[in-house]
Image (cartoon, rainbow, N blue to C red):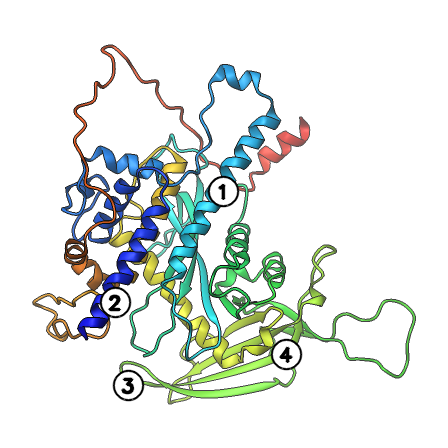
């Protein structure tokens, strides 16, 4: 690498860290130390052990203080006497004011992260991805708003159920120049899914913040969001259609029923409402399929040298049934079927069905839609890396707001690794003989994390060094802390609770 280019990359990384430092209104130096210790973690198994890192210049008390004060999302503390005097309207105004502050801070963080995103060269759109990840807390009996969540299980026969919270992650997928590039995904927002709402509702709020900001580089540019089967429901499809420059590519079940667009009757005008749906299209019954509008066949070679034939079929102007408030006949989409076969013409996987919907969905070809959806699995690498190397599920706290702050700090630590990937030197282990030292082109998050401590020790920190303030006086002798109240596990769709509410 040229020396001038190296100095330019260092200046860009320092500028990014300066802007990130300004996003924290309080305890900004401690927050940056915590992010550096988390990004450079190579063997710590608990959150408090991050205070032993050379990149964390403070005591272990500052770890919890930084998590508590990093994001201003908690509700203001009000005494019991003051609660009785103030009415409900004043409380709602305080809550709204605090929510506006947190959204402003979130917009500032997204603006800083967006500077790391390069404009796509090979494709004509920005690619986003969303997914939910579980945070199991089965033993946290004093944690509020805790319910049953889905968690995959490796043991066959066990139910994939646990107790805890789920978080909605919205990330941006950078463009891959080479097919063997590392699976990076840049997280933009991570919000907890309350038990009284669904994941699609939280994602809709995240998308409104990301798409409505005029200062972001993808504003008024074509954007594509790829999502799993859970995001192919009607309510979310309608929310996505409100954004003019956003196209959703979501996987759908193989047993769903769709409809063709009704034929246009130009000769005779009949009384009554015109026909809104055409013939039925059952994905599980090939006899109901009509001729596809486009068929594309591509031959791909895997890393093992195996040749696969990918057949992509597309049906245009398809419709789905809606309700009175959800008039889906106004939102046609493209239905895509992907079938992969080997050299013996046998199916490798079960055929996959995709939906491409949005005001500009016709600008995305079926093959590009399939290739974009394949990159969706990069967010799975981030979820695994965050839980194995960034301690995403290791913070034990009875406060819901502190847990939410910790998840956001983990996302920012991963963003720091992405920002420093061009400065990292690849240092393989002795048993990794297939990798070349300092010359490997595939820069993974693990490789950057292994070299992050050296990078920060050379470029320095944006904050000030800590100064000892003396020992705290601590609690008064004989003072006791009240025990925290335990909260039951909430189960969604409990019929007994609904019956009691109706009877009351």
- Between marks 4 and 2 in the image, the one whose residue lies nearer the viewer: 2
- Between marks 3 and 1 in the image, the one whose residue lies nearer the viewer: 1
Q: Earlier in the sequence, mark 3 or mark 2?
A: 2
Placement of 146 over or under 261, stated as above or below? above
Q: Earlier in the sequence, mark 2 or mark 1?
A: 2
- Between marks 2 and 1 in the image, the one whose residue lies nearer the viewer: 2
- Front residue of 259 and 133: 133
Q: Residue furthest front?
A: 4
Q: Which residue does the numbered mark 2 point to in the structure image?
A: 8
Can you tell which mark lies on residue 316? 4
Q: What secondary structure is marked by label 4?
A: strand
Query: How far is the residue under mark 4 from the one under mark 3?
Result: 34 Å
Q: Earlier in the sequence, mark 1 or mark 4?
A: 1
Q: Quadrant of the C terminus?
A: top right
- Residue shown at 45% from the left, 68% from the top: 127
Q: Earlier in the sequence, mark 3 or mark 1?
A: 1
Q: Is residue 210 left or right of residue 409?
A: right
Q: Residue furthest top?
A: 478
């Amino acid at each position: 690498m040229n020396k001038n280019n190296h100095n330019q990359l260092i200046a860009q990384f320092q500028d990014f860290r300066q802007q990130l430092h300004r996003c924290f209104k309080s305890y900004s130096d401690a927050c940056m130390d915590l992010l550096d210790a988390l990004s450079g973690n190579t063997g710590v198994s608990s959150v408090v052990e991050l205070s032993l890192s050379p990149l964390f210049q403070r005591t272990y008390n500052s770890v919890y203080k930084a998590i508590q004060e990093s994001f201003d999302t908690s509700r203001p503390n009000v005494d019991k006497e003051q609660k009785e005097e103030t009415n409900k309207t004043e409380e709602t105004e305080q809550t709204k004011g605090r929510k506006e502050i947190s959204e402003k801070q979130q917009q500032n963080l997204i603006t800083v992260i967006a500077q790391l995103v390069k404009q796509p060269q090979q494709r004509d759109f920005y690619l986003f991805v969303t997914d939910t990840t579980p945070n199991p807390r089965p033993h946290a009996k004093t944690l509020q708003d805790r319910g049953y969540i889905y968690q995959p299980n490796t043991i066959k026969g066990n139910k994939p159920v646990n107790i805890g919270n789920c978080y909605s992650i919205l990330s941006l997928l950078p463009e891959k120049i080479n097919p063997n590039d590392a699976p990076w995904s840049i997280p933009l927002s991570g919000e907890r899914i309350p038990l009284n709402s669904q994941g699609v509702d939280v994602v809709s709020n995240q998308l409104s913040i990301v798409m409505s900001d005029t200062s972001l580089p993808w504003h008024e540019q074509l954007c594509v969001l790829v999502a799993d089967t859970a995001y192919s429901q009607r309510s979310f499809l309608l929310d996505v259609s409100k954004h003019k420059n956003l196209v959703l590519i979501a996987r759908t079940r193989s047993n769903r029923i769709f409809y063709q667009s009704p034929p246009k009757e130009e000769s005779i005008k009949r009384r009554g409402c015109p026909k809104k749906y055409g013939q039925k299209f059952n994905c599980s019954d090939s006899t109901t399929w009509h001729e596809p509008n486009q068929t594309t066949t591509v031959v791909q070679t895997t890393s093992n040298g195996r040749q696969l034939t990918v057949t992509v079929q597309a049906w245009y102007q398809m419709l789905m049934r809606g309700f009175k408030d959800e008039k889906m006949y106004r939102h046609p989409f493209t239905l895509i079927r992907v079938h992969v076969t080997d050299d013996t013409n046998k199916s490798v996987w079960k055929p996959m069905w995709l939906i491409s919907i949005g005001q500009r969905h016709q600008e995305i070809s079926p093959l590009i839609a399939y290739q974009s959806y394949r990159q969706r699995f990069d967010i799975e690498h981030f979820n695994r890396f965050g839980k194995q190397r960034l301690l995403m599920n290791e913070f034990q706290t009875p406060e819901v707001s502190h847990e939410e702050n910790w998840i956001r700090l983990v996302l920012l630590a991963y963003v720091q690794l992405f920002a420093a990937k061009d400065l990292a030197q690849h240092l393989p282990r002795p048993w990794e003989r297939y990798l070349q030292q300092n010359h490997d082109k595939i820069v993974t998050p693990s490789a950057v994390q292994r070299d992050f401590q050296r990078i920060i020790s050379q470029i320095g920190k944006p904050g000030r060094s800590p100064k000892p303030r003396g020992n705290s006086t601590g609690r008064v002798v004989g003072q006791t802390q009240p025990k925290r109240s335990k909260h039951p596990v909430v189960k969604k769709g409990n019929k007994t609770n609904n019956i009691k509410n109706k009877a009351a």
